[in-house]
């Protein structure tokens, strides 16, 4: 049985049912809720950050990830202002590179990393280590050691083995790291199975229901070389309401009471994770950061008053909500194949190697003909990639103009989160470049891979 998501059933199934929406009134329209804030049509051509997408495609090639720098920075500032009395740590797994890390620092955000590689990016960019939280469900001894050596601000422990590892390393190095315990609250977010992260039957955290979370607290408190500062919870991704956060806060408050009653300790911090949804298609209605902050603040304060607890400092971890809307992927159309009576398959020069989300959990996107406008009638289309997989789909159902032709540039909106992070070299395809646009200029953040890059990893034969 599929779950119902607040934004609609399309987020509950691996692939949505065959019920495409009717064509839009204007195929050339750019919905401001979905596209980057600087996206415009100028002389019929899509521009982002004042840069013509045809020029971007010509100079940097396609596929191409394009980020509206001002869009990303503005969203970071909005979250920082909304949670002015707490902390905002950007979830690095959404997208990470050295330039982005510097933007986050300049806009006043902290950073969450979940692997040694993500930590390496932050360190290479000179990010303040005290503003880094280290996550991960199976952090190795080497990763923990690197985090301790770097002096990360928080380490979120996820297993009993990890508590023991961290305690041993902290004693060996003569440091006392601040620790949070990731709690599985049993809240099942209304989202796809693969991105719901707080129900009991999954790999993350310590179960509150079974008593494992309270036992984790005991073990951390028994290790004087660790400083327990709070609890951490993350209920899922692409969430459009705060109902799940309300239930999670209630259950975390009960756990805080149990900790106070057993140990005489009131923990000063509560990390409620991220997962705030963005608009991918018409009808998606994400909340603005202030509304999210006001709601979470009210929920936590109410729960703490009910249990006579001191109100902890709230931390949140938006990732997609900061970089997702400002990212666009450009593709060049290669072939247009009409399957009579069904739809037209539009093949582009990328696919599941640069955007796995559609194949992985049925994500939906909005796409337009970007290199020109068209007055042609709409055709029901499926935007597909070049890989040898029938599931190599970028946009499952969309309407494109009937005069679409090879060489046209198509833009897919809201690809700033997880597309580059989850990209691969499947079929030995090099990964695209990443560019930032601002004030009519473009600059490379990550260069395009080449076949030489891929061959360099091969041992000599």
Image (cartoon, rainbow, N blue to C red):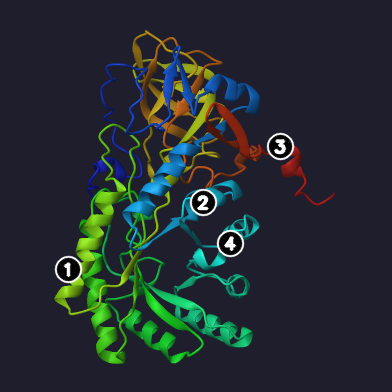
Which circle, 4 or 1, is nearer the viewer?
1
Task: Check if mark 1's residue and mark 3's residue have beta carbons within 8 Å.
Answer: no
For label 1, the SS is helix
For label 3, the SS is loop
Q: Which residue is mark 1?
A: 302
N-terminal of the two: label 1 or label 2?
Answer: 2
Q: Which residue is mark 4?
A: 119
Percent of width and height locating residue 178 = 47, 77
N-terminal of the two: label 4 or label 2?
Answer: 2
Residue 388: image quadrant is top right
* Distance CA(mark 2)–CA(mark 3): 32 Å
Which circle, 1 or 3, is nearer the viewer?
1
In the image, 66: left or right of 300?
right
> Mark 1 packing: few (<14 Cα in 10 Å), some, or many (20+)?
some
* Distance CA(mark 4)–CA(mark 1): 36 Å
Any mark on residue 106, and which? 2
Q: Which residue is mark 3?
A: 450
Task: Check if mark 2's residue and mark 3's residue have beta carbons within 8 Å.
Answer: no
N-terminal of the two: label 4 or label 1?
Answer: 4
Above or below 376: residue 95: below
* Distance CA(mark 1)–CA(mark 2): 33 Å
In the image, 11: left or right of 167?
left
N-terminal of the two: label 1 or label 3?
Answer: 1
Above or below 90: residue 347: above
Closer to us: 422 or 317: 317
N-terminal of the two: label 3 or label 4?
Answer: 4
For label 4, the SS is helix
Tell me which residue sits at (24%, 89%) in the image. 261
Closer to us: 25 or 363: 25
Percent of width and height locating residue 460 = 84, 50
For label 2, the SS is helix
Which circle, 4 or 2, is nearer the viewer?
2
């Amino acid at each position: 049985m599929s779950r119902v998501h607040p934004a609609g059933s399309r987020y509950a199934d691996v692939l949505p049912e065959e019920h495409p929406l009717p064509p839009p009134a204007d195929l050339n329209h750019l919905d401001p809720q979905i596209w980057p804030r600087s996206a415009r049509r100028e002389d019929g051509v899509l521009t982002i950050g004042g840069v013509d997408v045809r020029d971007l495609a010509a100079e940097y090639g396609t596929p191409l990830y394009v980020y509206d720098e001002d869009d990303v920075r503005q969203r970071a500032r909005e979250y920082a202002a909304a949670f002015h009395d707490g902390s905002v740590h950007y979830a690095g797994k959404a997208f990470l590179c050295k330039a982005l890390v510097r933007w986050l620092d300049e806009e006043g955000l902290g950073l969450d990393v979940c692997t040694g590689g993500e930590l390496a990016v932050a360190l290479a960019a000179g990010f303040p280590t005290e503003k880094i939280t280290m996550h991960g469900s199976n952090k190795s001894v080497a990763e923990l050691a690197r985090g301790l050596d770097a002096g990360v601000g928080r380490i979120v422990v996820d297993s009993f083995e990890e508590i023991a590892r961290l305690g041993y390393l902290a004693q060996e190095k003569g440091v006392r790291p601040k620790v949070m315990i990731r709690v599985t609250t049993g809240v099942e977010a209304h989202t796809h199975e693969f991105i719901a992260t707080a129900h009991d039957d999954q790999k993350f955290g310590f179960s509150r229901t079974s008593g494992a979370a309270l036992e984790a607290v005991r073990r951390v408190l028994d290790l004087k070389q660790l400083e327990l500062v709070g609890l951490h919870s993350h209920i899922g991704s692409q969430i459009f309401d705060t109902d799940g956060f309300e239930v999670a806060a209630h259950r975390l408050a009960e756990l805080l009471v149990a900790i106070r009653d057993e140990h005489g300790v009131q923990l000063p911090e509560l990390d409620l994770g991220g997962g705030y949804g963005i608009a991918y298609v018409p009808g998606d209605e994400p909340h603005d950061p202030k509304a999210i902050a006001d709601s979470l603040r009210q929920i936590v304060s109410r729960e703490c008053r009910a249990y006579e607890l001191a109100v902890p400092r709230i931390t949140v971890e938006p990732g997609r909500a900061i970089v997702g809307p400002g990212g666009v992927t450009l593709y060049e159309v290669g072939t247009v194949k009409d399957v009579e009576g069904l739809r037209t398959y539009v093949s582009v020069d990328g696919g599941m190697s640069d955007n796995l989300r559609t194949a992985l959990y049925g994500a939906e996107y909005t796409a337009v003909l970007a290199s020109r406008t068209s007055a042609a009638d709409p055709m029901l289309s499926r935007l597909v990639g070049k890989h040898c997989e029938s599931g190599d789909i970028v946009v499952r159902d969309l309407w494109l103009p009937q005069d679409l032709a090879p060489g046209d540039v198509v833009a897919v909106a809201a690809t700033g989160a997880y597309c580059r992070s989850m990209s691969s070299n499947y079929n030995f395809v090099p990964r695209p470049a990443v560019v930032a646009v601002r004030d009519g200029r473009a600059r490379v953040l990550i260069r395009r891979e080449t076949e030489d890059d891929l061959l360099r990893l091969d041992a000599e034969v």
